[in-house]
Image (cartoon, rainbow, N blue to C red):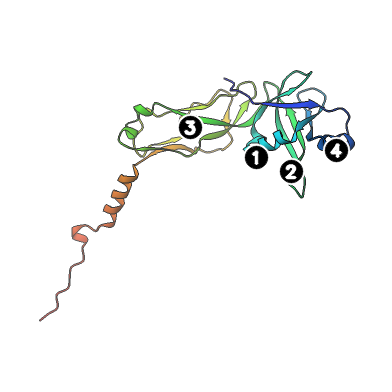
Amino acid sequence: MAGEIPDLVAVAREGTGKGAARQARRDGYVPGVVYGGGADPVTINIKFNELLRRLKAGRFMSTLFNLKVEGQEDVRVICRGVQRDVVKDLPTHVDLMRLRRTSKVNLFIPVEFENEDNAPGIKKGGVLTVVRPEVELVVTAGEIPDHLTVDLSGLEVGDTVTISSITLPAGSKPTIDRDFVIANISAPSGLRSSENEDDDTPAADEVPATEVADD
């Protein structure tokens, strides 16, 4: 079930306090701490450029990482805080929390679509419009799905796929408490245009009569 979890590489930081943190920043690192999971906190350093790249990529706070620190066992972590410079808005410290296999965590899971060839609406020229390419779920750290699957078989033009029509992994649930839309099959743009034109053209019995002046 678990998908490929990205690695987050760090090095152990010797010493604690502001002095060690400042030295880490001078050396091109962002200091951080790893806590939770029933173990003592550990101080680490992450390369500044690597952390900044991941922050710019988005979803950093809701991505599960495999933390790799030389000389230590790999551990699954999720970010629980990034401190930034108030002027430059650049990361100055990061807090990571260890997760047990039974821990619950919010993650964005990608949505994949299958059996487009078996969707009558698409065969007729309908267009698959994806509203949510990924869905935020509450999942168990030990059972993280690769993706959610939407079966398009039998769907016609105008049909809508909602979260309730998707089979979710056991123990997971959406963070949004309503039946939101994932995708739909819309009419081809050409058909929509022609329908709109037809709607704009008055019917014969709707054409206003031309007044004829009396002689």
- Mark 2 to mark 3: distance in Å? 40 Å
Residue 76 vertical position relative to residue 60 in the rendered view, above or below:
above
Circle 3 or circle 1, nearest the eye = 1
In the picture, the disc for residue 13 is none
Task: Mark 2 or mark 3: name the one nearer the start of the chain.
Answer: 2
Q: Residues within 10 Å of mark 4 (few under 14, many from 20)?
A: some
**Looking at the picture, does residue 96 appear above or below residue 89?**
above
| Residue 124 visible (yes or no) | yes
The first of marks 3 and 1 along the sequence is 1
Q: Residue furthest left?
A: 215
Q: Which badge, 3 or 4, is on the more N-terminal residue?
A: 4
SS of the residue under disc 1: helix
Q: Is residue 52 left or right of residue 22?
A: left
Reading the image, the residue beneath label 4 is: 22
Q: Which amino acid does the dot numbered 1 rest on?
A: Lys
Q: Secondary structure at mark 3?
A: helix
Q: Residue at x 63, y 24 (%)?
A: 5
First along the sequence among labels 1 and 4: 4
